[in-house]
Structures are given as C-alpha cells and as structure tokens.
Amino acid sequence: MWSDIFQTEKPGYYGQFGGMFIPEILRATFEELIAAFESAKTDPSFWMEYVQTMQSYSCRPTPITYLPNLSKKNGGAQIYCKREDLNQTGAHKANNVMGQGLLVKRMGKSRVIAETGAGQHGVATATMAARFGLECKIYMGALDVERQRPNVFWMEQLGAEVVPVTEGSSTLKDAINAAMRDWSASMDDTHYALGTVCGPHPFPTMVSYFQSLIGQESREQILELTGKLPDRIYACVGGGSNASGLFLPFLEDKEVELVGVEAGGHGIESGAHAVRFSSGHIGVAQGYKTYFLQNPEGQMMHTHSIAAGLDYVGVGPILSHLHDEGKVRFSSATDQEVIDAVRLLIRTEGLIPALESTHGLAGLLRESSEMDEEDIVLFNLSGRGDKDIFNIAEALDDPKWREFIHQKSNEYRRSSN
Amino acid sequence: MSGKLSEYLRNRLKEKKILLMTHTVVGYPSLEDNWRMLQEMQVANVDMVELQMPFSEPIADGPLFVKANQEALKNGIDWNAYFDFMGRAHEKFDFPLLLIGYYNSAFAMGHHSFCSRLAEHGASGYLLPDLPLEEMGDLQDLSREYQLNPIMLCTPTHKDTRLQSICTNGSGFLYCVARKGVTGAVTKIDPMIFEFLKRCRKYSDLPLALGFGLSTGEDLKQLQGHADIAVIGTALLKIWEEKGYEAYRSLLQELAVATA
C-alpha cells in the first residue's frame, strides 16, 4: 500500500528527513496532536466524515479535465489536469484545513491560528473557522499583506484577525515563526493549522494524509477516463502539499514518473529563486530537517518567485526523502516560462490557472512535446488564478489593467477629499 | 571551568542566596556594546553569562531578541566573529560562558566541530532550545569528551515522565522555563512557579535556573529559596535600548544587590 510510507521506523522521520525540533514548551501539545491524529486515522468514520464534508462543502471529487487543444498545440503527449482549482476558496488548501478543522472539533479547541504566504491558506483557514465557529488569527508577512490585499480583505470579512509579521524577510517563513510563537503560549485552547507538508511531526504526515485525497481520486479517474495510468504526473512544489497529495497514491505505480517543479524565479544562476533541491543543503529549521536554501553557516537565504505560494526556503521532508530515493524527479520553471504558460492555458483551454500551479504546467510543457502521442501526462491545477487578478495582471504587465487601477485610485482619492 | 560547572555553581551558592545568569546577543547592538555589557556584568559579580549565537529563524525568542538576532546577522556576525568574541571574553572575565543558539548552527558546523570550537574558546556548555533530547545523537558523547555541559530545558507543561528523563540527562544545571510563550513577556512570580520548581527538584539535585520574563531585583528576592539561579535576558537589553548605558548599569547593580 502506498500509505505504508507513513509507517516509518522512527515516528515522523522519512529517511533522514523530518523529525520534531521543537521548544520543550510545545512538547505536550505535539503529543496531544499526534494522539488525536492517530486516533482519528484509525477511526473509519473520521475519513468518511472528511470525504463527505469535502463533497458537500468543497465540490469534491474534483474532475480531471482533458486538454485537447493544449496537447495539440504543444505536440507530443496528451495532457490532462486535476481540477483542484474548483475547490472551495479556489485551491487544494481547502482539503487540508477542513481535515484539520474536523480534528480541532475532536480535540475540543476553540481557536485556530495559521501562517499564510500568498493568503490562500489564510483564506481557506478563515472559511473553515467561520464554518466551524472557531476564533481565528492569521499571521502573514508584512510584505505579503501589502502584496495580497484582496486575500487580506476576505480573511477579515470572514472574521479572522490578520497580523502582519515584520520580522526577518517579512514573508512566509517569518509568518510560520510567528505562528509557532503564538502557539507556544496559547496551546491550551488553540490549534495551529499549518498549511503545508512542512514543520515538525505530525504536520508533514497529517497534511499529506488529508491532501492524498487528490491523488486517490486522480488515480481512479484517469484509469476510468483513459484505461491506463499516466506516464508522468507533474505538480508545483513550494512547501509541497499539492505535490505530496497528488504523488503519494501513485508511489507504488512504477510506470508513473513523478515530477515536482520548483520556482526557478529569475533563473538559478541569478540567485533569485526558490530551488531547494539543486541549490539547497540539508539543515534544521522551523522544527524539521530538510533541504533548505541556506548559506554555509545555516542562515536562511532570501527566496524569490513570481508565485508567492512557492516563495519558501524549505520543502516537505517526505519529498526530500523521495528525492534522495530517486522516486520523485525535480525540475524548475522560471517566472517567464510561467507567464508564457499562463497565457497559453487561458487561450487554448479557457482555464485560468494560479501562478503557483502553472509551474507544474510549465515544467510539463517543456518535456511532453518530446513524448509520444499515446502517452498521457497529468498535472495538478492546484489553484485558480482569476481571484489573483492583481498578481496575474501585474505578471502579464497588462497596460489597460494599470490604467484601470490608476483611475480607481483617483476616484478613491477624490471621494476621500 | 568546563565539566565542573555544577560544582562551581554550588560553591557560589555558599556565598549568595541566589545566583545571576545574564545574556547578550553577540553582535547586537554591536560587539563593542557587548563588551561593555560584559564589563558591567563583571562589576556586578554576575555568576554566568549566555552568549547568543545569532540565527535567522529564532522561533523560541520574543520580538526584542528576534530583532537582535536579525540585526546581529546584518552586522556580519558569523561563526568566526562569534567565537573570536567568546574567546576574548573567556580570557578577560571570570564568569563561565554558555552558548545559546539554535540547532541549525551546530548541525551546519558538524557536531564535532561545534564541540571542539566551543571548548577551544572557553565555553562551559551550550543551550539549544530547539534540540530535544532524542535528537542529540552523538552530541551527548562529544559534550562529555570536550567537557561541555549541554543545558536541558524543563517546562511547566512537561508531564512527569518527560520531566524525569530531561532531569536525569541534565548537566551543569537545569534551565527551568517559568511559563508558556517566548522570551521577553512579563512573568508573574506565583506559587505555580514554586510548585514547578519543586517538581524539577524531585528529579534532580542539579542547581535550578529559572528564566523567561524576570526583570527586577524584587523578582530575584522572591525566588530565593526556590530557585538557585535567576536568568535575566530581555530586561537588560530592553533597558539598554530604552534608557541607555547608565540605566543598564544600575539595573545590574540592583540585581546584584538582590542576590545577596
């Protein structure tokens, strides 16, 4: 069984990666969370409740869509995508937060906190908190608060308090540190709903477990649609939650090649990127051991990506292990390749992808043209892009959009005078 | 000094009612300021000093130390600068020195090199708040080999079994964390803290240090008879920043008076 990967010899360790490098004050809290998760996992009604919740609240199972126009245009393999963009709040993040929300209810806690980069996980957490009647605080890098006003707006409308984090580089990693600090004082009534497959055990395991719904559905759906398993599947990798969710249920299918695509930013040689596997080193930070983009003395470096959700120094320990074992191959896509791929997908198939997800597509497009027409490739369309209109319009450098913003800004200025 | 840290502390306790451990982030505000701080600590007859090695992701620290870590890195403090400072401090001052920092520094340096460099520059031990006992690996053996004391942290949220295993693996002294949360926020000294210290005492006869949120001579007086060592970190840096050198000096003197 693919899920045997969670049955590790040393709990929370995947090969040499993972672990629990936490301040002692949080030890009992982590033990409580591990116990709650283990008991939920062995209770068949929990998974059923989770799947039903996702069906009624988040449109699951999300379909797989065949992309004939794009396949033809790019040449080579037939391209399919898993439609995680159709989830509640428009991304796969909903899977994880609803799962953790059900767990919070089991643990009887009344408050959730979370970190967010682009704001996707923050918005997803805020919807979950509203739905389950929980108090909610979201930590977000001050830079990201500036860049992602629409998501901040929604989080606040949903009743969450958004706290701008000004430490460090004022981005995702600093938001994680801030959430961890809050939790070390508030654990009695608070759950930290970490948004990706990183951090101390049990988060990598737990988030992968909830996200594996993506791959479980995909495997069945693609078999039904095409009569065979895909030759290759692609997913973008920031922390790695959508990739883990898609890949893990295919782990034992030797004929399926798994490809993770990292954020190449301005190119690896520029130094402005978030490519952990070829440029990073193994280290321990934010509570776990994995590949980090760090200097030789272990200080974390600045990262860059056009997609805020991939702009992160570390990567899930399960993926690091699978990388070292040769079970997942990693490549990267640059900002420019991503912009081109966004345009192409919008025009050929009428799908508007998130910039994050488009990294998976860009990695795919580079390779699938060399494959046979009978070959099948699948990528995870992990989020939709239309709600990120500010970012995408800026990335595409649309002059009419800029003019519109100027106009709006003038209107606001006039009405406030 | 190294290896015999607990003996040294016990001897000091014959002369004082409570000992004082202070702290500075190496490289913040500057190495020169750090040096002046240590000079004042010597004058105040401080019993032990933590030198923090800056790290980019200090998850156990509160806002003031987070900023200090960040600024120290911006000031270019690397391993060489840190150890050079430690070595000079060891030569000049009487108090034992401990490294406080985060595990990634030790991991990136390599356990062996981490221990040998600490020993070479006169450290008596180290505290790595994000390194739990079960992740120490060969650091335990190497520390013994280099006569370094890995300082363990006890917290009020520990269950008895874990508290016991931490206490029995302790070396030098035990660092008891007064409350939940990170460094810096104010701690009210109440009977809960005394109960917690009693729980630690049950499992170990090592000297007990209490830290997190202590700030005044009054705090130290209240702790006499309950804890062996009081740790003052944030309060000192805060007063240096807000009121300057003279105020820093008088706080140290107030603390020194309260130890007698």
Image: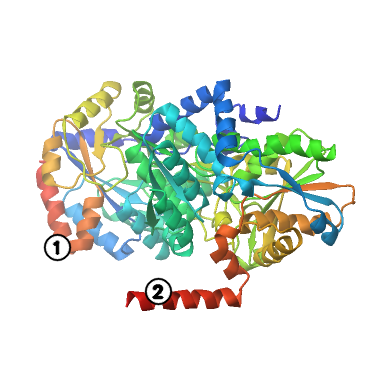
**Residue A338 in the figure: left or right of residue B103:** right
What chain is tagged by disc 1?
B
**Residue A144 in the figure: left or right of residue B209:** right
Residue B56 visible from this viewpoint = no
Q: Residue at x 35, y 51 (%)?
A: B52
Q: Which residue is mark 2?
A: A412
The image position of residue B44, as x and y in percent, is 16, 51
Q: Residue at x 48, y 64 (%)?
A: A147
Q: Are marks 1 and 2 in contact (CB under 8 Å)?
A: no
Of residue A413 and residue A312, the one placed in the foreground of this image is A413
Residue A87 visible from this viewpoint = yes
The image position of residue A126, as x and y in percent, is 44, 46
What chain is tagged by disc 2?
A
Q: Which residue is mark 1?
A: B246
Q: Tag 1's secondary structure?
A: helix
Q: Amino acid at mark 2?
A: Tyr
Of residue A49 and residue A109, the one placed in the foreground of this image is A49
Q: Quadrant of residue A185?
A: top left
Quadrant in which the C terminus of chain B appears: top left
The image position of residue A233, as x and y in percent, is 75, 46
Disc 1 and disc 2: Cα gap in Å? 51 Å
Above or below, B150 against A402 in this view is: above
Mark 1 packing: few (<14 Cα in 10 Å), some, or many (20+)?
Answer: few
Above or below, A178 against A322 in this view is: below
**Residue B35 in the figure: left or right of residue A37:** left
